[in-house]
Image (tube, rainbow, N blue to C red):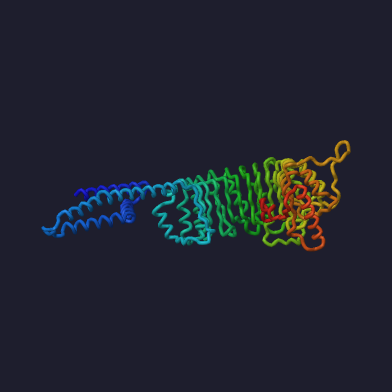
Amino acid sequence: MLATMWEVVALCFAVWIAVQHFRELRQHSAGGIIRDCFTVLITSHMVHFTSFVAVSCLTLILNFTPISPTANSLSPQIILGILENMQIAVLGPRLILSVREYHAKLVADADAATNMTSITFQERSRHRPLVIGHVLKRLFEQFPPTILFPNLCELHLEAVFGLLERSSKFWLLRQFISPGLQALRFDVTGIPTHEVEQLFTTLPAEAHGLRQLSVSAGNGTTALTVPPSLGKLPKLIRLAIFGIDVSLTRQTIANIQQARCLQSLKLKLCGTSCDAGGIPLELPSLKTLYLSDGSLPQCTHFLRQVTTRQLSHINISYRGSASPAEVTAFVESLSTSCQTFEDLERIYVVDKSEHPDYLLVIPLHSESFRPLFKFKRLSSVKFIGIGNFELDDRFLNDIPVAWPSIQELKFISWKRRAFYSVTFTTMMSLASRCRSLRTLHLTVDATQPTTIPRAPDGTEELWPTQTTLRNLHLGYSRVSEVARVPYFLAEVFPTLWDFKFYELYLRNCAADIDLRLALEEAHSQLMALRNSPYDNSDKLWENNSDDSGT
């Protein structure tokens, strides 16, 4: 009798612990609670129940086994006593301890899930999990994501979309939408247009806390229509849409314009023809603008349709060779887009054509870039692979006055040859006068003796020491010994540690061989003066910058 009462108490205690656990997880179905409780008890404590049944069977066998009067009656009593003590002192407490241990583990796992703030499904692993849409659907029906992850604020479902069938994509995305979500990234490939529009319409109500939103379709090859509802997200500060039809540029800007707090806009352009345009629309809080994949004229057209008050960073990655006139038009469009000239700090323009024609000569004179002198706060100016630069000494002499805070200056021809119109003397003057300049990429002519500046009394006096310049890339510069390039670099720029040139793209013709040998000699002499190891890998220099593709 005592053993039975003990087992009843132990079992009730175990059931109570399991019920408390499932109440903490806020399960909806009472039937589900009872079923899960017994599942936990049976699967986790099979050893206890098996042992209890075995002891009970042995007890029954001893109770109903006839005992001879002549036999020793103490033996059965001793065995029964041992079995009862096992039930009371071993099996019962073991059940309680096991349930408590299991409960503690589940609570720890639940807390870890509850505190999760970011979910990213990586699809780059070699062995993808075999995820089936209906399995995930049943899982999240039983355990809604908003309950499992109440603190979730960042969600990237791009990889999951690649694994699920189309019918499950939209449903799965909707399950994670919540007011607490702050960053959302997803792909709508394969989702019907009306369902995408419906999702955008519901976002302001169901995810009004969104601050960052990134949407793509077919890796940006399919155009997306930006609905006005996106502008109704009150906290949206970063928006990225990979796939904008350039024929709907004005409509797109008008809908984005409603997001009054938007600070960063990233658009991937597609299509061939631009719309008619009209009076520019204002994006008052925009600070960073990224445009990619369109032609340079399409990017220029977009800039002419917007005005900004605080634009500080502009990043353009276009495709297709641009003519000198188109480059000039782009530079001029910055002046019309920026209402003030006091905020723009960084300009990055690169030709990202897959198969550019490097034999096509695109002469880019200094006059094409002079409109940029209006922006006095520029700290980074980078034009990469857009043409054959033909800058002059007068342009370089004006840079220290126009951009006193310049830190990065790159006119990179890459596989296009720049013209040798800038002298090494002017480059030295530029680098020494720009006291904040850290990185310089320029092709110069260093075949003539370097002109040393003179003091007021007429004596030669080296340029003032500049201790900021760290990286110097001379591209396809022509160098001769009379210019004394290593000596002046070592004397004026004591912190210069990275001196590179384009060795990889030099041909095996006589002129290029002479050019390579002269640059290598200048480099080795500079390293000898610095007592530094010889290293002429221009790959390292480029990978340390944001121009790794060049």
The residue positioned farthest toward the left in the image shown: 69
Q: Quadrant of residue 343?
A: top right
| Residue 365 showing in the rendered view | no
Q: Residue at x 11, y 58 (%)?
A: 70
- The x and y percentages for residue 510 are 82, 62
Q: Nearer the viewer, residue 240 or 281?
A: 240
Q: Quadrant of residue 283?
A: top right
Question: Is residue 431 rendered to the left or right of residue 239?
Answer: right
- The x and y percentages for residue 364 are 77, 53
Q: Quadrant of the C terminus?
A: bottom right
Q: Residue at x 49, y 50 (%)?
A: 202
The residue positioned farthest toward the bottom in the image shown: 508
Q: Nearer the viewer, residue 159 or 73?
A: 73
Question: Is residue 158 rendered to the left or right of residue 4?
Answer: right
Q: Quadrant of residue 273?
A: bottom right
Q: Residue at x 80, y 60 (%)?
A: 513
The residue positioned farthest toward the right in the image shown: 458
How many marks do you count on the picture? 0
- The x and y percentages for residue 10 are 27, 48
- The x and y percentages for residue 61 are 19, 59
| Residue 428 showing in the rendered view | yes
Q: Nearer the viewer, residue 198 or 423?
A: 423
Q: Nearer the viewer, residue 535 or 509?
A: 535
